[in-house]
Image (spheres, rainbow, N blue to C red):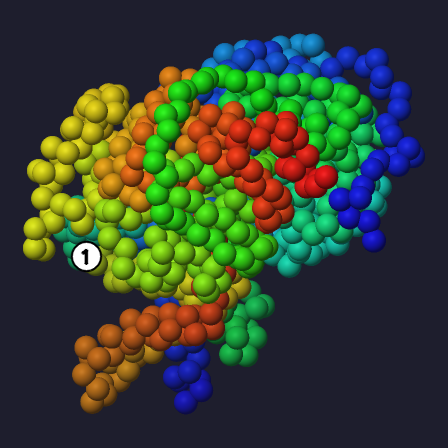
Amino acid sequence: MLESFIVPLLAATVQSGTPILYATLGEILTEKGGILNLGVEGMMSMAAFVAFAVAYTTGNPWLAFICGGLAGTVMAMLHGFVCITCLGNQVVSGLALTILGVGLCNFLGTPFIGLAAPGFSKFAVPVLSSIPYLGKIFFRQDALVYFCYFIPFIFMIFMNRTRLGIAITAVGEKPGAAAAAGLKAVKLRWMALLGGGFLIGLGGAYLSLAYTHLWANGLAGGRGWIAVALVIFAFWRPGRAVFGAYLFGGVMAFQLRLQAIGTHIPSSLLLMLPYALTILVLIFSAVRGRGGNAPSHLGINIEPEG
Amino acid sequence: MKGPQDLTRPDSQKATGFADAAPLISLKGITKRFGKVVANKDISLDLYPGRIKALLGENGAGKSTLMNMLAGRFKPDEGYIEVDGVRKEFTSSKDAIKAGIGMVYQHFMLVETMTVAENVLLGQEGSFFINPREMNDRVRKLAVDYELEIDPTARISDLSMGEKQRVEILKLLYRESRVLIFDEPTAVLTPREAFRLFEALWAMTRLGKSVVFISHKLEEVMAIADEVAILRRGAIDDEVMRDKITSKADLACRMVGKEVLLEVTKEDVEIGEKVLEVKNMTGIGLRGINLHVRKGEVVAIVGVAGNGQQELVEGVSGLRKPPKDTIFIMNKPWRKFFAEMTWNNSMSYIPEDRLDLATARNLDLVDNLLLTTGKGFTKGPFLQRDKAAKVAQELVEEYDVRPGRIQALAWQLSGGNLQKMVLARELYRQPHLIVAEQPTQGLDISATEEVWNKLLEARKMAGILLITGDLGEAVQLADRVAVMYCGQIMDEFPVTDTAKLDNIGLLMAGVRE
């Protein structure tokens, strides 16, 4: 049971949690800077498509991965133009971004359906992969998963131990105070938004480069929305985001396996599991009353003065 | 324990050695307009090292606007700022910080979720990575040096108001600011905390820093200032050395000003029944208030702002619930009056805050007319907007509200025109009692005259309770004057009693002969 079911399940958990983790960290960075971005689903979709198209045409998966991140950044720029430059409503702009991203991705992606592109394959890390159980779960993955292990640590150091990270936190909490301290609040918001967009894009790129090597429409499959919910569940902390992302990865992997084994439970009910969990997670966060952890100026635009 | 009330500066606290120093900062002919409102008019001011300059003025006199320009948040429309005799243009807070100007805002500019040290170092240049331990040590040392004890690792949200203010001061000291501006710093402090603040201010002047202290509390200004500049209607009205001010009463007189800017003729009207009676009212910040207003009378409440006028207005106008059986309007107890209040033939309130309390800034003049007169334009469940538009047009013409279009939005009107519109609306309701709060604050002479004449005319139908910080206004309009200090009425007398009127400064400063 352990060898044949649990260990492969956990290994699959890590794999399906990785894109969610990238996106959740990206959204945390964005929100820390005070911008609410509900376009994650659309950004991941577009990034997945761009990454696939680049990998398909150039055959270079690393280039494709970076291009996926850049696609996220470009989508974030659109959001920034509406919300930061034109002071538009962040919720509306984010929703529009999702509709745009998903739609455009399906439109552009249709000719690619069923095609395969070079991506990342799994390889065993020497020494570490021979640790019993853990080795199989964590160290027989692809390069992007290994890369992802470092990101939460880098993220934590960035937010807590660098001037820029603290400045971004200040802008999300109280842009007026940041401006009075001589910081350029608007510029910092742009940085958080674009940096976050890049991470979200990497999450999207993972879907088409490593999770699967075949193109199919609707690859993001609601992961963007889960990432948005996870930010709340994580109380805007990267450590908890790791836990949350793997929890969701686990549920997604579990329902796939259950379907494969062939249970009596209808597959549509199983497919619903991650979203049911999203609701549970949000209820949990609300009950714990930590909504107060949100950056105080989240979703509030910086009005020019003078 | 010492509080700010009985406080004078001990000799040991005096800053010496800066007697002949050149000014650190000079403001030269600064003018600032917001739309058509002139917030600051040709202001020149010098700030010297080692001195505390008090900037005294009523709300809306332009103190905060002036200091925001000094702190680089606003740009002056005319005039310029000199730092060490060199002309400077500030485009952002950063420029002002670089020039050594720091400001402690009335509403603290601190990030609540971050620690003291993080707030102090926010926006400071330095290495990309930070070392929290070294950062905390640096802030701790700074705090010890200036005797502003605080735990650098504490979160701002856990601190008291006094402690938060200390963090703000540390921020400025860390940036080595030479000019420190305090915007009403004691408003949020307990007396003990205020005393500690004063000690800190003195310590800073001994180090050659220049301090600007914005306040409207006379005691504090008397206690700590070296120089006093009085701001009225956006301009410097008076600038004196502290030594030349003989008493708190003297300062109060200088603050309200006595010069007659404008005279209006006041016809006699018939005095009618009582429309407002306040009986022995104690509570909501007031003590033992007795007051009445008859139809045809103007009763002026004067005093330095913040001595209970606000509470009295809020109680009478129904914004705040007074203690039981203390306020009677048109012979009805407060609760009954507001329960049965009709849109007309009752009470009108003309608030001080024209743009956010009296009107809705993004609505046009018709909708703004309907704000308080809406019930007069209904037919069944429907609103007769056409009829309201017609009335609005008539009022705009009658009161000469410019621009004469009823489609104009409230914020597009200048202060004077907006006030005329508010007055037109409130008088249209045919009130029996009018509560007018600072009705001419920030208005130019001609608008002031029009407002005064309208109010005097309104005496034919109503009694007027006038709250004003301008003694001239009280003298011109009132029949009786009541002086408020610390939530009490010090004295009430007919405006014809010139002996008392001459000593009004004493009463405003809380001195009873």
Q: Please state, as top left, top right, bottom left or bottom right, where the C terminus of chain A lies in the image.
A: top left
User: What residue lies at 56% left-to-right and 41% top-to-bottom?
Assistant: B492
Res B473 visible: yes
User: What residue lies at 16% left-to-right and 28% top-to-bottom?
Assistant: B394
Image quadrant in which you'd find residue B297: top left
Instruction: Give percent across and percent down for residue B454.
Output: 32, 28
Is residue A47 or residue B16 the one in the foreground?
B16
Is residue B175 or residue B36 the one in the foreground?
B36
In this picture, is A110 found above or below B428?
below
Is residue B173 or residue A227 the one in the foreground?
B173
Number of residues whose C-alpha sits closer than 10 Å to that of mark 1, classed few (under 14), some (14–19) or many (20 or more): many
User: What residue lies at 27% left-to-right and 62% top-to-bottom?
Assistant: A222
User: What kind of element bears circle 1?
Assistant: loop
Is residue B6 or residue B467 the one in the foreground?
B467
Instruction: Give percent across and percent down for residue B99.
Output: 66, 22
What number of labels is visible?
1
In this picture, is B184 found above or below B34?
below
Residue position marked by numbered label 1 in the rendering: A217
Image quadrant in which you'd find residue B168: top right
Res A27 visible: no
User: What residue lies at 37% left-to-right and 39% top-to-bottom?
Assistant: B271
Q: Please state, as top left, top right, bottom left or bottom right, where the N terminus of chain A lies in the image.
A: bottom left
In this picture, is B370 found above or below B1?
above
> Label 1 marks which chain's residue?
A
Image quadrant in which you'd find residue A9: bottom left
Instruction: Give percent across and percent down for residue B507.
Output: 65, 37
Q: Amino acid at mark 1?
A: Asn
Of all residues, the one furthest to the right in this rendering is B12
Is A173 displayed left or right of A268 in the figure? right
Instruction: Give percent across and percent down for residue A241.
Output: 47, 63
Is B340 displayed left or right of A174 in the figure? left
